[in-house]
């Protein structure tokens, strides 16, 4: 019976939405084909390539969303991650929610909405569009019945407001749903912003101030109340996720404690920060892959790492754009470091970092294009005055 409900959802909402976008993109057939591929993947993952129970959280979102749709009392509180995510899913106008494919179709619609917003907000370009359509982790999580696309949507809106509109308070308002969807992502967004403003406003004293902050945070964190609270919270997360690896079987956890590395202080903490920043970007490493999915993730990680190096080697002419890129790099550093310190599971690592990677490349590539347009404007006003040759934007 669920199959019939999913066919109705597919025909009357997903296919209609796809056809409308396909008509809009009628001059770009390859992008239309890739979007169609996203629809196919919804039905090629759960119970085909792997059992739906492999990500058992999917069934919880289906169950609680159905309870909201039926106006019955949900079995979880609204202020919980599961409750709030399911409420949002239940409000999206899909006729039926009867299977994990139903929620996956909702996530595809969110994916499609972000893709259209890229064009509406003038963020779109060939590089941005193809990255968005081809990024494997985004393809995976936009085709599952999990909350990650909701997280990505609100992160996208909040970062757009911050980076392009420069409205800090409004960006925090748009980011506020993330506090219930994935609280740590909200903390990383705020932490990345604080780190950015420290570096941006320090001027020539930037490196001196950064060095002083690092010294206080690493060697005497108790002297910086905010850092001390974050330090304690990260250590709590670390051990909780370490125990989660063993399903909170405390007998097993006690036996495995010898493999647990608590947060240090001083030089050792600095070593951990650098180590886990790169490890989060790259794990699972190629020799750590135990199955085809992990092998794909490992290859994806190496490509992404190379792309990060490549785009950061681009020379930026506009000072304002350099500042915005600084924010993106601060957000990447904070998110990868904190996630790297607390996440042990390879699958969780890919899931936790992919929204930040999407945000990073979408806005970085947009800023690079904006800088090239600015460069062309400068040269059209008088290229001989600056000694530059025109380039195509």
Image (tube, rainbow, N blue to C red):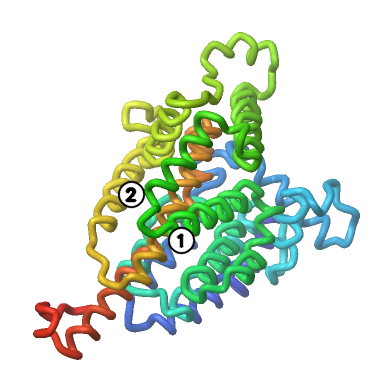
Q: Position of residue 344 (x, y in %)?
A: 52, 30
Mark 1 or 2: the one toward you: 1
Q: Where is residue 296 in the image (x, y as percent from the top left)?
A: 36, 41
Q: Which residue lies furthest to the right in this view?
A: 73
In the image, residue 258 above or below residue 29:
above
Q: Which residue lies furthest to the bottom in this view?
A: 381
Which residue occupies 51% across, 48% down? 45
Q: Residues within 10 Å of mark 1 (few under 14, many from 20)?
A: few
Which residue occupies 42% across, 41% down? 211
Screen quadrant of the N terminus: bottom right
Position of residue 112 in the picture relative to residue 317 (left or right):
right
Q: Where is residue 299 in the image (x, y as percent from the top left)?
A: 31, 41
Q: How many labels does the image show?
A: 2
Disc nearer the start of the sequence (1/2) = 1
Give the image quarter of residue 204. bottom left
Q: Are marks 1 and 2 in contact (CB under 8 Å)?
A: no
Query: Which residue bears the numbered disc 2?
Result: 304
In the image, residue 115 above or below residue 5:
below
Screen quadrant of the C terminus: bottom left
Q: Position of residue 47 (x, y in %)?
A: 56, 43
Q: Is mark 2 on a helix, strand or loop?
A: helix
Query: Which residue bears the numbered disc 1?
Result: 201
Q: Residues within 10 Å of mark 2 (few under 14, many from 20)?
A: some
Which numbered marker is on residue 310?
Answer: none
Q: Is mark 1 on a helix, strand or loop?
A: helix
Which residue occupies 35% across, 43% down? 301
Give the image quarter of residue 361. bottom left
The reply to whether residue 68 is in sight is yes
Distance from the alpha carbon under mark 1 to that under mark 2:
30 Å
Which residue occupies 58% across, 13% down? 257
């Amino acid at each position: 019976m669920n199959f019939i409900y999913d066919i109705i959802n597919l025909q009357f909402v997903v296919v209609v939405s796809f056809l409308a976008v396909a008509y809009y993109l009628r001059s770009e057939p390859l992008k239309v084909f890739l979007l169609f591929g996203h629809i196919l993947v919804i039905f090629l993952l759960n119970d085909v390539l792997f059992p739906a129970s492999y990500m058992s959280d999917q069934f919880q979102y289906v169950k609680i969303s159905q309870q909201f749709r039926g106006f019955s009392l949900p079995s979880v509180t609204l202020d919980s991650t599961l409750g709030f995510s399911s409420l949002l899913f239940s409000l999206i106008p899909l006729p039926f929610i009867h299977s994990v494919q139903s929620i996956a179709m909702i996530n595809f619609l969110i994916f499609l909405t972000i893709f259209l917003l890229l064009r509406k907000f003038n963020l779109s370009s060939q590089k941005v569009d193809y990255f968005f359509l081809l990024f494997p982790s985004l393809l995976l999580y936009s085709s599952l019945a999990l909350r990650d696309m909701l997280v990505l949507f609100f992160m996208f809106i909040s970062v757009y407001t911050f980076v392009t509109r420069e409205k800090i308070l409004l960006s925090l308002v748009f980011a506020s749903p993330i506090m219930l969807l994935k609280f740590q992502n909200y903390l990383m967004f705020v932490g990345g912003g604080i780190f950015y403003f420290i570096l941006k406003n320090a001027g020539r004293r930037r490196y001196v101030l950064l060095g002083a902050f690092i010294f206080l945070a690493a060697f005497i964190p108790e002297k910086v109340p905010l850092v001390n609270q974050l330090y304690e919270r990260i250590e709590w997360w670390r051990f909780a996720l370490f125990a989660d690896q063993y399903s909170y079987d405390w007998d097993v956890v006690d036996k495995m404690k010898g493999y647990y590395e608590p947060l240090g202080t001083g030089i050792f903490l600095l070593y951990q920060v650098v180590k886990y920043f790169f490890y989060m970007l790259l794990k699972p490493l190629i020799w750590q892959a135990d199955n085809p999915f992990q092998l794909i993730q490992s290859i994806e990680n190496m490509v992404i790492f190379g792309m990060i190096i490549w785009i950061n080697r681009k020379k930026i002419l506009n000072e304002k754009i350099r500042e915005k890129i600084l924010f993106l790099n601060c957000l990447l550093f904070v998110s990868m470091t904190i996630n790297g310190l607390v996440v042990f599971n390879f699958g969780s690592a890919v899931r936790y970092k992919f929204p930040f990677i999407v945000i990073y490349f979408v806005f970085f590539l947009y800023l690079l294009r904006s800088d090239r347009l600015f460069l062309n404007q400068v040269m059209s006003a008088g290229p001989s005055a600056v000694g530059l040759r025109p380039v195509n934007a």
